Image (tube, coloured by chain):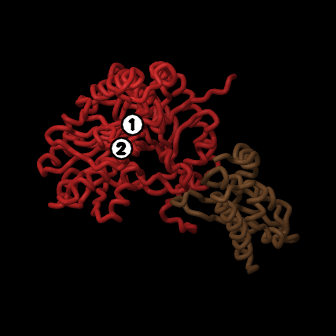
Amino acid sequence: MSIKKVYLDNNATTPCDPRVVEAMLPYFFEHPGNAASRSHPFGWEAESAVDIARQQIAKLIGADDKEIIFTSGATEADNLALKGVYEMYSRKGNHIITVTTEHKAVLDTCKVLEKKGAEVTYLEVGADGMIDLKALESAIKPTTILISVMWANNETGVIQPMKEIGNICAKHGILFMSDATQAVGKIPVNPRDTGVHLMAFSAHKMYGPKGVGALYVSRKDPRVKVTAQMDGGGHERGMRSGTLNVPGIVGFGKAAEIAQAEMEQEAVRLSNLRDRLENGLKSSMEEVYINGNIDHRMPHVTNMSFKHVEGEGLMMTFNQNIALSSGSACTSASLEPSYVLVALGLGDDLAHSSLRFSLGRFTTEEEVDFAIEAIRNGVNHMRDLSPIWEMYKDGIDLSTVVWSAH
Amino acid sequence: MAYSEKVLDHFKHPKNVGTLDKNDLTVGTGLVGAPECGDVMRLQIKVNPSTNTIEDAKFKTFGCGSAIASSSLATEWLKGKSLSDAMKIDNMDIVEELALPPVKIHCSVLAEDAIKSAIKDYQSKNGLS
C-alpha cells in the first residue's frame, strides 16, 4: 500500500493551481520587464500584464481596478490599512474597534498603534464566534475612525454579519476595514455592496502564489486615503512603493479568474465533503463537538474538538499522512491553546482538544474517507491512553477533581 | 517540530499503559497536571512491601507525544527499582534519554512529579511518611 499524504490545511496555504503556474512562467524570463519602466517594450509588456491581473482581481470583488493596491500579502495589507488610516485620519479621532478573534496581523498592528496613542476596543464574540451588533454599535465613540472585522475566521470559518456592520459604519460615518483573506475567492465578496472601504486579501489562500496580496481601497463614496508605510518610487498611487512582483501579480490575477468561474460549484462540492467529514467523525465517536456557528461559516472549514484528547498528541498519530492544524498555523509552535477558541468561551480543555480541517480545490472524497479513518483511529488510541477519558467513562465529574496546575 | 525516534517509538507503542486498583494498599497513585494546561499524567506503582521494590508500574497520560513518551519511559525505569532509587530519577535523565527539545522539558518535570507523587501516596497509605 502506498503511503498517502492528504492535505487538509488549505487555510494555512493553498497549492498553486497548475493553470496559475502556467500563466506566471513567461514573466520570469520571456517577459522580464519592470512594470514601472515606461520607456521600452519590456516595461510595457509587464505593465499590461499587471493591468490585466488588476482587472481580473477587481472583477472578482466587484471593484474598480484602480481600487486594488498590490502588496506582499495580506499581513502587509492589514498593516497598511490600519497604520495608514490611523496616520491619515488621526486628526478626526484615535479610536479603533476590532474583535478578539482577528488574525494576529490585525491584533498585533493594533497593539503597535496603542503605543502610538490609539485607543482600541477589542470586541468579544459569542459562543458561536459571531460579534454582537448591539455591542459593536454601543462601542462607537465620537473619536472612532475605523472598525476592523475579519470577513471569515481562519480557525473556525465563521462568517461575520458584514452587511449589517457596513450599515452601522455608514450610519455613523466610520471607515470599515476587513481582513477578507479567508473569504475572497471562496464565497461571494463585494466590498462596495457590503459597505467595506478597505479590504486585505492574499493570492496564496486562493490557489495563487505566495508573496503577493492586495489592499482594496475605496475610491468613491467615500474616497479613502491611507498614508504609505513603504516609501520609495511612489508605486500603487503612492500608497505602496516597491517594484511590482509581476509574475506573482499575473498569478494572482489568473487565480482570481479561476476562482470566480468555479466558486459556485466548488462551494457546493466542498460543503458536501465537509459535511461528510463531520458526519463520519461524529457518527462513530462520542464527545465530538463542532466549534463556531454552523449556519454562518465557510463551506470548506470545520473546527472540531475531541474531548479528553490533547490536540498536539492526536495530530502526532496521523501527521505523517494527514496535514492539518491544531489551533492556527501561526501559533502551532507555541503551547498555548488557540486564542480564537478561548474567545468563543471554550474551556481550555476543549480548546486543547481541537483540530482545524480546511478542505480545498484538490481535496477528494477518497481523501476525506481516509482522513476519517485515520483520525478515528488516532482519537481512539489517545483515549485509550487518557486518564481523563477513563475518569469520564467511570462517571467522575472532572470539574470536582483537584488538579495540580503547573 | 521534529520528534526523536525514541519519542515516536514510545508514542506509537507506549509501554505499561493501564490502571492499577488505587484502593489496593500496595499501589501508589500519582495524578499530576491539569486538563486546561494540556497535560495530565497518572502514574501508578505496585510495591512489594517486604522488599520495598516496585513490581509493576502503569500509566495513562493526556498530553502531547513528549508527555506520553516521558511517562511511558518512567514506567519502564520504575519496574524493579527500590523506592529509594525511584526517588532519585531526575527529569533531566528523561530529557537526555528522549532527546526532548527545550519547549518540552516541562513534560519530563511532570513525569518526575508523577513518580514522586505516586511514591508519596504509597507511603502515606501505609503510614510510612
- Chain drawn red, letter? A
Residue identifier under label 1: A213
Q: Which one is nearer the viewer's eye here, A214 or A285?
A: A214
Name the chain letter of the residue that bears numbered label 1: A
Q: Is residue A324 above or below residue B81?
A: above
Label 2: few (<14), some or many (≥20) within 10 Å?
many
Q: Which one is nearer the viewer's eye here, B51 or A257?
A: A257
Residue identifier under label 2: A77
Q: Residue at x 26, y 57 (%)?
A: A96
Contact (CB < 8 A) between labels 1 and 2?
Answer: yes
SS of the residue under disc 2? helix
In the image, residue A147 lies at what x, y percent? 24, 51
- Tell me, yes or no, if residue A235 can be seen here: yes
Q: Is residue B11 above or below residue B107?
A: above
In the image, residue B96 lies at what x, y percent? 77, 59
Q: Residue at x 68, y 56 (%)?
A: B101
- Tell me, yes or no, if residue A294 can be seen here: no
